[in-house]
Image (tube, grey):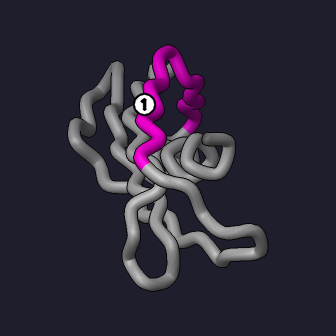
Amino acid sequence: MAFADTLGALGAVANLREGARTTTIESKTNFVGAAPLGARLIGEATPVHLGSRTMVWQTRVATQDGRLIALVTQTQLVL
């Protein structure tokens, strides 16, 4: 979950107007599978909403072979 939260936050930061900051106000994680010990995980954060006061990001975490491990949706408040 920390991995996905970081990816969503980085996406939000990359889309902030100059001088703005962001903080996570909501995060929901659905763990749908387990990764084998030592597996390399791949995360992809996609914007669902890029508003002036909030941003919503959905991050998919999967194994290298594409097997879904977790789906995370987070809302970022723009400060």
Q: Residue at x 55, y 48 (%)?
A: 4
Q: Horizontally, is 38 left or right of 21 in the view?
A: right
Q: Quadrant of residue 46?
A: bottom left
Q: Is residue 40 above or below residue 69?
A: below
User: Residues in magenta?
Assistant: 19-32
Q: Is residue 25 visible?
A: yes
Q: Residue furthest right?
A: 38
Q: Residue at x 42, y 35 (%)?
A: 30
Q: Please, what secondary structure does the residue beneath circle 1 have? A: strand
- Closer to the camera, 60 or 19? 60
User: Hey, what amino acid is under mark 1?
Assistant: Gln
Q: Is residue 66 above or below residue 76?
A: below
Query: Crowding near pointer 1: few (<14 within 10 Å), some, many (20+)?
Result: many
Q: Is residue 23 magenta?
A: yes
Q: Horizontally, is 28 left or right of 20 in the view?
A: left
Q: Residue at x 63, y 47 (%)?
A: 6
Name the quarter where the N terminus is drawn: top right
Q: Residue at x 40, y 25 (%)?
A: 75
Q: Is residue 17 visible?
A: no
Q: Is residue 38 above or below residue 1?
A: below
Magenta stretch, overall SS: strand
Horizontal and vertical percent position of residue 36: 66, 69
- Closer to the camera, 42 or 37? 37
Residue under circle 1?
74
Q: Is residue 9 magenta?
A: no
